[in-house]
Image (cartoon, grey):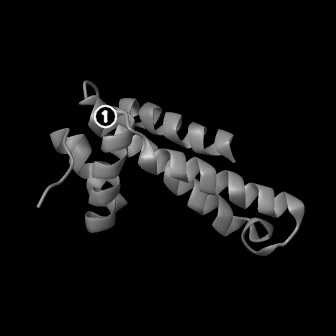
Amino acid sequence: VMTGGILAHEFMHAWLRLQGVSRLNPEIEEGICQVMGYQWLDWFEAVDPEASSSRSEKAQFTRNLKKTFKGEVENMLDGAYGDGFRDAQWAVSRYGLDHVIRHIIRHKTLPRE
């Protein structure tokens, strides 16, 4: 579970480079990468019915691990990873992931009101 979230985060870094995006403010880049790792955790649970509904010990462990990892991301104090995540998460919840990513690619910032 945690490996998947970390890989999703790191793949977002790579994908941004493939799109020609460089020299982003660390809060923007780490923030959107944290959002991708965070969303991967939700995706993982959605595609693994045992992880979301089973009462087995393994399923409960997986749910607890996901909850713990998401809590760590949500409550991180670091500016780039914590504040960046919260800002990017707000933008994604307001405008949608596709719009936010397109905006980052074009303007190297998060969309604001």
Image-based side of 92 in relation to 113, left or right = right
In this picture, is 18 found above or below 87?
Answer: above
Residue located at (25% from left, 30% from top): 24
Residue located at (44% from left, 47% from top): 75
Residue located at (19% from left, 42% from top): 109
Which residue sits furthest left?
Answer: 113
In the rendered image, which quarter is residue 4 located in?
Answer: top right
Residue 93 at least partly seen: yes
Image-based side of 102 in relation to 40, left or right = left
Between 22 and 50, which is closer to the camera in this rendering? 50
Q: What residue type is disc 1 on?
A: Gly
Q: Quadrant of the C terminus?
A: bottom left
In this picture, is 46 found above or below 90?
Answer: below
Report the number of numbered marks: 1
In the rendered image, which quarter is residue 29 located in?
Answer: top left
Residue located at (76% from left, 75% from top): 53
Residue 19 at least partly seen: no
Between 62 and 48, which is closer to the camera in this rendering? 62
Q: Mark 1: few, some, or many residues within 10 Å (few <14, many ≥20)?
A: some
In the rendered image, which quarter is residue 17 located in?
Answer: top left
- Residue 43 lies, in percent from the top left, at 59, 61
- Residue 44 lies, in percent from the top left, at 65, 59
Q: Which type of secondary structure does the marked residue at label 1 adopt? A: helix
Which residue sits furthest right?
Answer: 56
- Residue 99 lies, in percent from the top left, at 27, 59
Image-based side of 38 in relation to 5, left or right = left
Which residue sits furthest bottom?
Answer: 53
Pointer 1 residue: 79
- Residue 45 lies, in percent from the top left, at 67, 64
